Structures are given as C-alpha cells and as structure tokens.
Image (cartoon, helix red, strand yellow):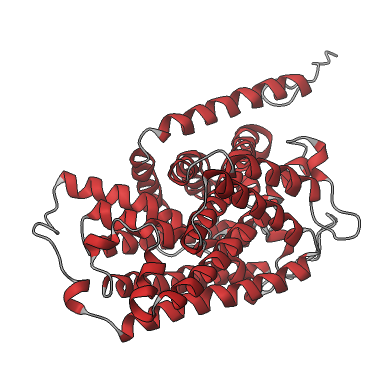
Amino acid sequence: MAIEIKPESTGLERGLGLKEAVALNMIEIVGIGPFVVSSLVIRAMGGPQALIAWLAGALLATLDAFVWSELGAAMPKAGGTYVFLREAYGPQRWGRLMSFLFVWQTFVQAPLSVASASIGFAKYAGYLHPLSPLASKSISGGLVIFLVILLYRRITTIGKISVLLWVGVVATLLWLIWGGMSHFNAKIAFDFPPGAFHLSWLWFAGLGSAMVSTIYSYWGYYNICHLGGEIKDPERNIPRGIFLSVLGITILYLALQTSILGVVPWREAQNSDFIASLFVERLYGQAAARFVTGMILWIAVASAFSVLLGASRVPYSAARDGNFFPVFARVHPTKHFPHISLLVLAGLAFIFSISLKLKEAIAGILAMRLLVQFIGQAVGVMLLRKRKGTAGLPFKMWLYPLPAVLTMIGWAWLFWQTGASRKWGLAEIALGALAFFIRAREVRQWPFERLPSTIHS
C-alpha cells in the first residue's frame, strides 16, 4: 500500500491528481514541437522512413521513464531532478555540486524551452498573416507575459486550466489524425526512395540528426516530478502519470506523422514551414487550415504553460535547501506558489524569445540538459540502489539495470549529435562548476567547510 505523504511545511499544497498530472505532462510534451520539426525529421531521414526516428524517440523516452518513475516515486518533492541528484550523489558532498549544476542549467534551459514554444508560436502565426521580424518578436515576447498572467494563481486552479488546455491539445491531434486516416493514400505515405533502409554511417547520422528533433518533441513526460510536492498519492500517481503520458503521446505522434505522410508527399512536406496547416488545407480547404493553425497556437501556449510551471519549482527547492539564493524560496502569501522563481525564469524566457531562432533554441536545450540531468540521473539511480537498496522504493524499474544503462548510451549518442551546440553545453557546465566552488568557498560549504578542531586530552 502506498504511504500517504502529508503536506510538507513548504507552503505548497498537494492539489494535483492523476488526471491533472497526465494533462500537465502531455501538454508539455506536445507543444509546438511536432508541428515545427516534422519537416526537419523528414528531411534528415530523406523519406517516409522518418517514422523510424519518431519510434526511436519513443523507445528512448520509455527507457528513461523507468529512471524518472523510480526516482520520482521515491522522492516526491518540489524540484524533481534537483532533489534526485542531491540524494543520489550525497547531500553533503558531490550531490551539492550536481544539484547546483542542475539549478544553474535551469536558468538557461527552462527559459530556452519556453522561448522555443513562443518562437514556434510566432512562426506558425505567420500562416494566418505574414509577420515582420519585429511583429514576430513582439508576439513571442507577449506570449511569455500572457503565461505569467495564467500561472499567477493557486495550484488547484492551475490544475483546472491544465485539463482545459489538454482537452484542446488532444482534440486537435485526434482531428488531424482522423482527417489523415480518412483520406489516407498508402502510395504517397510509403513512397520510399532507393536506399531508404541502407544502414550506412550516413543513415545513422541522419537518424541522429532526426532524433535531436523527435526527442525534443517527446520531452516533458517527467514534468510532474518537478511538481512532486503538489501531487496527491505521488508514489502511485507519478509512475502512472509518466507511463500513461509516454504511451498516449507515442500513439498520437505515430498516427499523426503517418497521416501527414499519407496526404502530403514527403518531398513537398520536408520543405514546408507550416506542415500541419498545409495538410489540413489539402483536406478541407483554407478556412479549415486557418482554424487548425489557431489550435496549434493553443497547443504552443499549453506546452509553454506546463514548462514554466514545472521549472519554477526547481530554484525554489534549491533555495529552501540552502543551496541557492534565499530569495527564490519565497512563496506567494495567498496563492501559495514560488512567485519569485516564476517571475525570474519568465523574465529570462522573454529575453530569449525576442533574441533567438528556433533551431538554436532546440539544439541548445538538448546540449545543456543531457549530461547533468539525464545521464546524471541514470547514473544516480544506480548509485542510490547500491547505497540504500530497494526495500523502501515504491516503484522499481523493470529489468534493472538495463533501462538505465541503455538510457545513458542513448543520451550520450544524442549529445554527440547536437554538433556545435556541444561546446555551449560543456561551457555552461564548466561555468556552473566555477560558480559553485566560488559560492562554496564564500559560505564555507563542501569542499571548503571548516573542519572541527581536534581536542587533545
């Protein structure tokens, strides 16, 4: 039987059930991703075999879901990865460094994630009306401000908003899939070019490039771990929420991509900036295409909403732990959420949304997160099992340690595939480590803590 966790004395409330948890995960996963990267995936793979990249992304997400589920069920607290890394590597030693690095990265990668959704929002809005560069930046920046307005409220209200956004997301995907399946042309969908399955090094390079885009579109299945302190019955609902999200999105993505390929020839689709709008235009005409573009904008809002919500709990958790600036531990006196953390991350997202391009944002997100967060957690779950055993784990990954090992290999390969962005990811880790050691020296924490004097008798 799962242990009922009483509300912690943090000012947060456990107001999210399984329904809200799945909704928050799924709206973060979908986002603008599959609508702006589909053409990139087709181009990288060179044909309908692009579906392999979507299936491979789902497989890697499923393997990683075992890591998140085991850690999330065992440590259901605000901050998610911050708490996992701290405990896995030792809260008094290396865990301090690893968890600090994650918080440090959060101030870049979380705003980048929100910015990628807002930039994609502005890009897709260009289908409805051509936008100047200035107008596009104004729209992407304005979306971030709108998100803050939506999120500035209690978690129970946030849960209701998330379900509403989720309904719009799923309804849009189902409509697109139904339209594609009812007009499906197998000759178009499976028009494989010569050598489509010739497994050369060039083929795998294409797969790696495509998976950078597909895994970006799957990320978010773990969002509820960052809200662990606000989930009801977390030992059961966190693993269930993660796996239900991955399964549901995998089915929807594969059906959506197959539907598109069955209507729009891949040689045309690979060069389209508005692939979903073009798809609906072919099926139902211009008016329907404009409507679905509006729904894709809804999806972009939903994703950024979920990302910013989960990320805002990370600096809050670190500050409460004494491992980050105390101001981020402040909770709104009446709405009970970490408002300072939310406002700072939103401010950075605003800056990124008006200054970056979408492709730069996507590659940067992956390069910065893979080493510390994803590979770090896969190693961490093994360290925890070695040190503490499995007796107290509410959820245990199947076939341990195979999922964790395969996850590490997959993330390492994808890190290499990020190309030039690798150096920015490594540089950010190096700067974070430097900041950690400077701060540790100032406050006399590990590895610079004062040792107690030896008393001689």
Quarter of image, res 322: top right
Can you say whether 97 is above or below 137 in the image? above
Q: Residue at x 79, y 20 (%)?
A: 452
- Tell me what residue is drawn at x 52 percent, y 40 percent: 356
Q: Which residue occupies 66% across, 23% down?
A: 447
Whole-percent x, y for residue 131 in the image: 52, 52
Quick one: 289 or 173, which is closer to the camera?
A: 289
| 198 versus 157 height, above or below | above
Q: Residue 141's x, y, as percent? A: 64, 48
**Residue nearer the viewer, 435 or 262:** 262
Q: Position of residue 2 (x, y in %)?
A: 67, 72
Residue 391 visible in image: no
- Number of numbered callouts drawn: 0
x and y percent of residue 153 in the render?
Answer: 80, 62
Q: Residue at x 62, y 32 (%)?
A: 97
Left or right of 365: which side holds 176? left
Q: Which residue occupies the foreground of this view, 346 or 389?
A: 346
The extreme right residue here reads 333
Tell me if I can see residue 68 in this picture: yes
Quadrant in which residue 39 is drawn: bottom left
Q: Is residue 433 left or right of residue 177?
A: right
Residue 14 located left or right of residue 291: right
Task: Determine whether 447 is above or below 294 in the image.
Answer: above
The single residue placed furthest to the top in the displayed view is: 456
Return the residue nearer the eye: 95 or 15.
15
- The quarter in which the N terminus is drawn is bottom right
- Name the outermost residue toward the bottom: 182
> Which quarter of the rendered picture does the C terminus lie within?
top right
